[in-house]
Amino acid sequence: MSAHAGILDELERDLGLSARLHVLVNAGGQRRYVPMPARVENSTLAKELGEDICCWLAGRYGGETVIFPSRKGYEREDEASLLRAAVLDAGLTEPLRSANDIAAEFGVSERWVRNLRAELRQDLKLPDLPLFANK
């Protein structure tokens, strides 16, 4: 069994937005068995998602049990990505925007933004900010 993070992005790229939305509505947040390509035609998944989508899935994940991302999970991932981007755009060592401004924009706490900024500095191996800067 596996969770495939980019499965819906790949599906949308190859089959379009309607295919992505169809999977989210019918299988989002569920663990589902993907049939082998030779068995797609009579499968329950093909009846629910459509044969074209099921054939695409079978070509990549046939014989596996896949956990499809949920709609809410995808929305949260997108929001988290936008928050990270805003923190990076504002700057990690000498921010151009305050943590309060970013927190208000994204509906999170100022502490969350400061912690995220520190985590990103650590991930990018930037030096920690001194408690009292020498000027």
Image (spheres, rainbow, N blue to C red):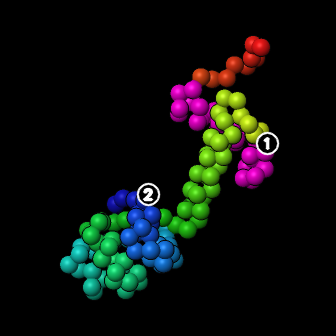
Left or right: residue 28 compared with residue 116: left
Left or right: residue 122 compared with residue 111: left
Query: With respect to residue 39, does 126 lie above or below?
Result: above
Residue at 24% x, 73% y is 36
| Camera-nearest residue between 51 and 9 | 9
- The amino acid marked with disc number 2 is Ala
Q: In the drawing, what numbered circle is on residue 52?
A: none
- Residue that badge 1 annotates: 100
The x, y position of residue 82, in whole percent, is 62, 52
The x, y position of residue 18, in whole percent, is 48, 78
- What residue range appears in magenta? 99-126
**Any magenta on residue 106?**
yes
Q: Quadrant of residue 49?
A: bottom left
Left or right: residue 26 compared with residue 80: left
Residue at 40% x, 74% y is 15
Q: Secondary structure at mark 1?
A: helix
- The answer to whether any part of residue 67 appears in the image is no
- Residue that badge 2 annotates: 5
- The amino acid marked with disc number 1 is Asn
- The answer to whether any part of residue 43 appears in the image is yes
Dot 1 or dot 2: first in sequence order is 2
Residue at 69% x, 40% y is 90
The x, y position of residue 57, in whole percent, is 33, 71
In the picture as drawn, the residue positioned furthest to the top comes out as 134
Quadrant in which the C terminus appears: top right
The x, y position of residue 31, in whole percent, is 41, 68
